[in-house]
Image (cartoon, rainbow, N blue to C red):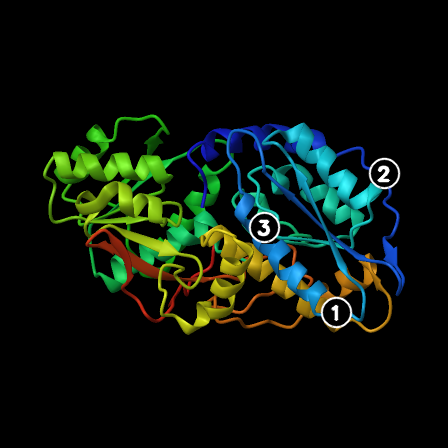
C-alpha cells in the first residue's frame, strides 16, 4: 500500500505531529445552501518523494458521475484535492486551506503518509470527518475524526499471521519488518494480538530490515531457523529484491507472505517465475480478478475515466461512495455539522468490495475493514486463493 520510499517519508510525519497539533484556532462552521456546491476535500501526496494519485482520482470519478446525474438534491459536488507534497508543513497548510479557507464539509479519498499524523488533531477540533481512501500511518486508525476504508498495514499483518498459522497450519512462523518512524508499536500490537488469539509465538521476529538492505542475510536466517512461513512488509522494489534472492539462494519449503504493497501488476511482471508461490493480502476484492461481479461498477467507471486499476483506486472509490450515500440521506442543509453528525451516527454500511461493513460512529478510533483476500503469484499472474474473505477474529491494541 505504500510506494518505494514510503517508509522514509513516514518518519517525517512522526516528528511533526506534536508541532502541528497545537495552537489551533476555532474553526468556523462550513455551511452551504441549496444554490451552492457541496465542497468536499482531500489531502493527498500528489508530488514529492512518493505519490498516491489514484485514490483521489478514483474519488473524483465517483463525484463527477454524481454531478452528471444531477448532483445531491441538485447541488454539485466540488472536489478540492490539496497536495501535501510529501512535506509535513505543506500537509498542515493544505488541510487548513481546504477546511478553513474553502469550507469543505468533509474529506474523502485522501491518500498520504503525512495527512493523518500531521492533521488528525486539527480535523478533530474543526469538527470535520475524513473518510480516508488509504490509511497508512497508525494515527489514521486512532483518531475520532478519521475512519479509513482500508485495513492498513498493521491489521493486514495480523491477517497474514492468522492465515499462516491457522489456515496454512504452520508452526514455525517468522516475521521480517522494515521499521521507521512510529510504526514499531503498531506492528507489535498486531503480533501481540495474534499471539493472544492463537497461543502461538513467532519463531523469528526481526525488525531490522531497511529499505536498502540486502535481503540475502535475512533470507538465509529464515532458512537456517527452519521457518515454514515468512511474513514481510516490503514495498514493491523491496519485495522484488527479496524474492529474487530466495530464487538465487534456492530456498525451498517456505511460504512467503507479503502485505498489500507488492500486490501490483508491476511486481507480477518483474518477478515472473522468480515469484512463483508468493502470497499477498488484498485489502479489497482483488482487483486483478477480472471476472468478479463485485468489481463491475468500479472497473467500468475507472476504465471510462482513465483511472488506473489499483488498490489505491479502490480505496478512493469506496471513500467517495460512502460519502455520497451519506450526503443523500441528510435532510435539510448540508453543512459540516450535518455531515459530521451523519457519520457519527452512521449505521454499518456493507459493500461487495470489502469483507466487513464500513463504520464511523462516535468511537475514539476506527478500524472497520477487518478482512482480506489472499492472492498468490502463479505463472506470473496474481490468482485468488481464498474466494471467501479471511476475517481477523482478534482485536488490535
**Dot 3 corresponds to which residue?**
57
Q: Is residue 102 left or right of residue 367?
A: right
Sequence-earlier tag: 1 or 3: 3
CB atoms of marks 1 and 3 within 8 Å: no
- Res. 344 image quadrant: bottom right
N-terminal of the pair, mark 2 or mark 3, is 2
| Mark 2 secondary-structure assignment | loop
x, y percent for residue 173: 24, 49
Q: Which mark is residue 25?
A: 2
List the residue tagged with mark 1.
70
Secondary element type, mark 1: loop
| Res 43 quadrant in image | top right
Helix, strand or loop under label 3: helix
Report whether residue 21 is seen.
no
Q: Position of residue 36 (x, y in %)?
A: 86, 59
Q: Residues within 10 Å of mark 1 (few under 14, many from 20)?
A: few
Looking at the image, which residue is at 31% across and 26% down? 213
The spot of residue 267 in percent (x, y) is 31, 44
- When the figure is inspected, residue 63 is found, relative to residue 2, above or below; the finding is below
Circle nearer the N terminus (2, 1)? 2
Pick the front one: 93 or 379? 379
Amino acid at each position: 500500500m505504500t510506494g518505494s520510499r514510503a517508509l522514509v517519508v513516514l518518519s517525517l510525519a512522526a516528528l511533526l505531529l506534536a508541532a502541528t497539533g497545537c495552537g489551533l484556532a476555532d474553526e468556523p462552521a462550513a455551511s452551504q445552501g441549496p444554490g451552492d456546491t457541496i465542497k468536499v476535500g482531500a489531502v493527498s501526496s500528489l508530488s514529492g518523494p512518493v505519490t498516491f494519485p489514484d485514490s483521489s482520482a478514483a474519488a473524483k470519478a465517483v463525484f463527477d458521475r454524481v454531478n452528471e446525474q444531477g448532483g445531491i438534491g441538485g447541488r454539485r459536488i466540488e472536489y478540492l484535492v490539496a497536495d501535501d507534497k510529501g512535506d509535513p508543513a505543506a500537509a498542515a497548510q493544505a488541510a487548513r486551506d481546504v477546511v478553513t479557507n474553502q469550507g469543505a464539509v468533509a474529506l474523502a479519498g485522501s491518500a498520504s503518509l503525512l495527512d493523518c499524523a500531521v492533521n488528525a488533531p486539527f480535523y478533530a477540533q474543526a469538527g470535520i470527518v475524513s473518510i480516508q481512501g488509504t490509511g497508512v500511518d497508525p494515527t489514521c486508525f486512532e483518531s475520532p475524526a478519521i475512519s479509513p476504508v482500508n485495513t492498513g498495514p498493521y491489521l493486514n499483518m495480523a491477517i497474514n499471521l492468522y492465515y499462516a498459522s491457522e489456515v496454512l497450519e504452520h508452526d514455525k512462523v517468522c516475521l521480517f519488518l522494515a521499521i521507521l518512524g512510529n510504526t514499531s508499536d503498531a506492528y507489535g500490537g498486531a503480533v501481540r494480538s495474534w499471539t493472544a488469539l492463537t497461543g502461538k509465538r513467532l519463531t523469528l521476529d526481526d525488525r531490522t530490515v531497511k529499505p536498502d538492505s540486502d535481503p540475502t542475510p535475512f533470507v538465509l536466517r529464515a532458512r537456517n531457523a527452519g521457518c515454514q512461513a515468512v511474513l514481510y512488509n516490503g514495498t514493491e522494489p523491496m519485495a522484488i529484491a527479496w524474492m529474487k534472492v530466495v530464487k538465487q539462494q534456492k530456498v525451498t519449503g517456505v511460504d512467503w507472505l507479503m502485505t498489500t504493497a507488492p500486490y501490483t501488476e508491476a511486481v507480477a511482471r518483474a518477478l515472473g517465475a522468480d515469484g512463483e508461490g508468493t502470497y499477498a493480502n488484498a485489502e479489497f476484492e482483488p482487483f486483478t480478478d477480472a471476472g468478479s461481479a463485485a468489481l463491475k461498477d468500479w472497473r467500468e467507471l475507472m476504465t471510462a475515466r482513465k483511472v488506473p486499476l489499483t488498490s489505491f483506486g479502490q480505496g478512493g472509490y469506496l471513500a467517495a461512495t460512502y460519502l455520497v450515500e451519506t450526503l443523500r440521506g441528510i435532510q435539510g442543509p448540508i453543512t459540516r455539522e450535518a455531515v459530521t453528525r451523519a457519520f457519527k451516527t452512521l449505521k454499518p454500511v456493507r459493500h461487495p468490495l470489502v469483507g466487513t461493513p464500513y463504520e464511523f460512529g462516535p468511537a475514539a478510533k476506527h478500524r472497520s475493514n477487518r478482512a482480506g483476500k489472499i492472492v498468490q503469484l502463479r505463472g506470473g499472474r496474481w490468482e485468488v486463493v481464498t474466494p471467501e474473505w479471511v476475517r481477523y477474529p482478534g482485536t488490535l491494541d
